[in-house]
Image (cartoon, rainbow, N blue to C red):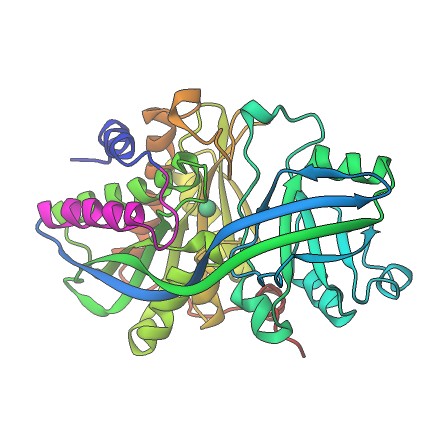
Amino acid sequence: MDVSGKRAFDLLKSLAYVRVSGTPEEKQAAQVLLNVVKKDGVEGYIDTFPVHAGKVHRARLTVTAPYVKEYECTGFIRGESTPEGGLETELVYVEGATPVNLARVEGKVALINGRLNYKLYEKLMGAKVAGIISYSGTVIDRESETDIDILKLRETWTEPFGFTVAVNVRAKSAMDMVKKKASRVRIEVESERFDVESRNVRAVIPGTQYPDEVIDIGGHYDSVMFSTGVYDNMAGTVIVLELMHYFAAHPPKRTLRFHCFGSEEQGLLGSKAFCAAHEEEVKKTRLMVNIDIGGSVLGSEKAIVTGSEALTHYVEGILDEAGLAVEVSRDIYSSDSIPFADRGVPGINLLRAGAPGAAFIHDRRDNLKNGFLSAEGLESTARVALEIVRRVANAGNMPVKREIPDDIREKVDKYLFRKK
Ligand SMILES: [Zn+2]
């Protein structure tokens, strides 16, 4: 018995629907994944955790001077509601968060280039903006073929910097406003904040010889809105379960814990919740193997080692010996290996990176109907993952040191917005 791309692809097909954090669809997918675990006779659990969320009941954006025009927009989830009659004020195009631009946004609405992020939010809130307009997509998008992303003010932003009014528009709309020198806007948002429940699915195969030495193997199964998240990342999830199938039939010397993480797309919330709720258990973790994106027909295998040079060379050695063509590098990877690295656990991030123009993430194009995923693509990464995990799990002496070198530590701290 071996890993099977076909079986993985069949499971992926049955879960190829939008699975946003905290929705009934995410919950349903978790149950399907747990059933797969149970069917193999493996010990499995669903762990729930709260996620700050909300709903935007209404969002409207109107330029009121020097012309009047309404632009289609979406309100940021967890954004502030506007007062009765809306928020009407001056509009400033903030090309970059330079001191000159920031000095003139107080009490005004800032139109930014592209997406909002932590750094920009910190600066705009520090400059006392009254509201933010971001955009997504490209200036040549066709409305019939694209969605306006529904974004969220993340708790990592709002906890330190507070809340504001925020809407998102199409890139084309942003360009139109700048071309026509829009100088005043009215924003009307009715938004509600509440918590929802998200879920991690976890399976454990105890080690036959070294049960207290643990390898965590994970992939996230949630998606963003409008995306069925098959490439990102039901592909990784089904590969994680392929490994579970294999080790259920071939008991490993070390304990293997398999994770399907929820809410990764909201800021690694599932893996953060697992690590926070199982601090003592994670102290036993020697290695984390994370799989995020995979299955593309045109693509290439990559391994990003969040750990030492020694671990990187070890991974290269395993793959060379097995004759598996994988590009190995050493860095952090924006995914569920981060909370483990934060606790001193080295990680190996595996992915089948889509070739240029041959794979899509985070919008409606990440969909099976576009035909860019295959069973062979899934099996390719599953073989790489199996080879690495099999070697480490069954080694006579643990070949991986539980250590994070300083340069990686610094990158993790920066990623988690820690200030020195
Ligand atoms: Zn992902």
Pinpoint residue 400: horizontal percent, then vertical percent.
Answer: 40, 63
Q: Is residue 34 magenta?
A: yes
Residue 137 found in image quarter: top right
Instruction: Work out whether residue 75 can be spotted.
Output: yes
Where's the C terminus, which quadrant? bottom right
Name the residue nearer the viewer: 11 or 199: 199
Q: Which residues are magenta?
A: 18-40
Left or right of 140 in this view: 151: left
Instruction: Work out whether residue 405 can be spotted.
Output: no
Residue 15 found in image quarter: top left
Left or right of 41 in this view: 5: right
Residue located farthest toward the right when viewing the structure as drawn: 100
Pinpoint residue 265: horizontal percent, then vertical percent.
Answer: 46, 51
Where's the N terminus, which quadrant? top left
Indicate whether 54 appears above or below 220. Answer: below
Indicate whether 323 appears above or below 201. Answer: above
Indicate whether 257 appears above or below 388. Answer: below
Which residue is drawn at the image coordinates 38% and 59% (left, top)?
288
Left or right of 33 in this view: 109: right
Pinpoint residue 157: horizontal percent, then vertical percent.
Answer: 59, 67
Which residue is drawn at the image coordinates 86% and 36% (left, top)?
180
Which residue is drawn at the image coordinates 18% and 62% (left, top)?
207
Name the residue nearer the viewer: 297 or 118: 118
Q: Is residue 350 magenta?
A: no
Q: How many marks?
A: 0
Name the residue nearer the viewer: 418 or 190: 190
Pinpoint residue 232: horizontal percent, then vertical percent.
Answer: 44, 40
Which residue is drawn at the image coordinates 22% and 46% (left, top)?
33
- Determine the main secondary structure of the stretch shown in magenta: helix
Left or right of 276 in this view: 78: right
